[in-house]
């Protein structure tokens, strides 16, 4: 009887086939945390200057949006942290720019994920025909998966970009369904940032009434949706 292979072993074999995928996974797993350790102290130190930025100036608004796109799209800073900082330091004047930046960052993350990922998923799924058939069967409903993954408050933005790049979800579906799915939790975190006086409280504590329950609701709904997506179709009895 053939011994079951571990996920680590499969990833190791896939990395040998495409070393760039190992780099990509390590990058999206580690870099956002490292970037946060550098960026948060700097942003708090420069809080007065950042808060004084005039977003009625197109140059300032587009420059800030461009920086946010690079930080999120290249997985340098978590999107949740960017949302909290934006709400705390800039207020509602920055919200629409944050949404636009998030959407463009989605395309940037998808592009580099697709470039680095190559055919790694096909190589991995070649060893799991049942999983491959399931994904092929659900391919037309990929928008549903994108929505529930983006809705989840625990699945990192950068990691999901890489995942959808490997799945070849298509940038239009990722942009549309991803933005819709991300809006609820982004708005919640942004609102938290506008209501508290300490950025750490905006990220780690209940900054608004009921926020913890809303977080749990988002998590539960996203898990339900993802499990529903991957649930195999029941075979109907022709008789």
Image (cartoon, helix red, strand yellow):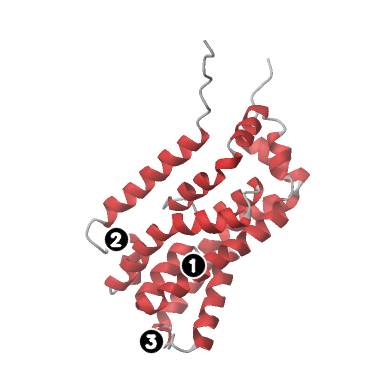
Say which of 157 and 198 sits in front.
157
Q: Residue furthest top?
A: 239
Q: Is residue 223 above or below residue 88?
A: above
Classify mark 2: residues with Cα within 10 Å, few (<14), some (14-19) or many (20+): few
Residue 158 at least partly seen? no
Tag shown at residue 48: 3
Q: Residue at x 33, y 52 (%)?
A: 215
User: x, y percentage for residue 136?
Assistant: 64, 36
Q: What's the distance in space between the residues labelled 3 and 2, CA to CA?
A: 23 Å
Q: Residue furthest left?
A: 209
Q: Residue furthest right?
A: 17
Q: Is residue 89 above or below residue 117?
A: below
For marks 2 and 1, the one nearer the N-term is 1
Q: In which quadrant is the N terminus drawn?
A: top right
Q: Does residue 168 appear to the left or right of 81 in the view shown?
A: right
Classify mark 3: residues with Cα within 10 Å, few (<14), some (14-19) or many (20+): few
Tag shown at residue 36: 1
Dividing the picture into quadrants, the one containing residue 26 is bottom right
For marks 3 and 2, the one nearer the N-term is 3
Q: Secondary structure at mark 2?
A: loop
Residue 43 at least partly seen? yes
Residue occupied by mark 2: 205
Q: Residue at x 23, y 56 (%)?
A: 210
Q: What's the distance in space between the residues labelled 2 and 1, CA to CA?
A: 18 Å
For marks 3 and 1, the one nearer the N-term is 1
């Amino acid at each position: 009887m053939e011994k079951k292979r571990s996920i680590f072993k499969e990833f190791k074999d896939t990395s040998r086939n495409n070393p760039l995928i190992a780099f990509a996974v390590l990058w999206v797993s580690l870099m956002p945390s490292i970037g946060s350790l550098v960026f948060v102290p700097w942003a708090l130190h420069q809080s007065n200057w950042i808060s004084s930025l005039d977003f009625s100036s197109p140059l300032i608004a587009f420059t800030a949006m461009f920086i946010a796109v690079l930080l999120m799209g290249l997985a340098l800073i978590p999107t949740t942290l960017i949302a909290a900082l934006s709400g705390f330091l800039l207020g509602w004047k920055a919200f629409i720019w944050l949404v636009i930046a998030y959407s463009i960052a989605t395309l940037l993350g998808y592009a580099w994920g697709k470039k680095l990922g190559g055919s790694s998923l096909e190589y991995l799924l070649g060893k799991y025909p049942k999983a491959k058939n399931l994904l092929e069967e659900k391919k037309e409903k990929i928008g549903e998966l994108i929505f529930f993954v983006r809705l989840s408050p625990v699945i990192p933005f950068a990691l999901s970009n890489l995942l959808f790049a490997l799945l070849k979800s298509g940038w239009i579906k990722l942009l549309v369904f991803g933005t819709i799915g991300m809006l609820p939790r982004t708005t919640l975190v942004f609102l938290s940032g506008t209501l508290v006086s300490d950025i750490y409280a905006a990220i780690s504590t209940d900054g608004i009434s009921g926020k913890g329950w809303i977080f749990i609701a988002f998590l539960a709904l996203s898990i339900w949706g993802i499990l529903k997506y991957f649930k195999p179709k029941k075979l109907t009895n022709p008789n």
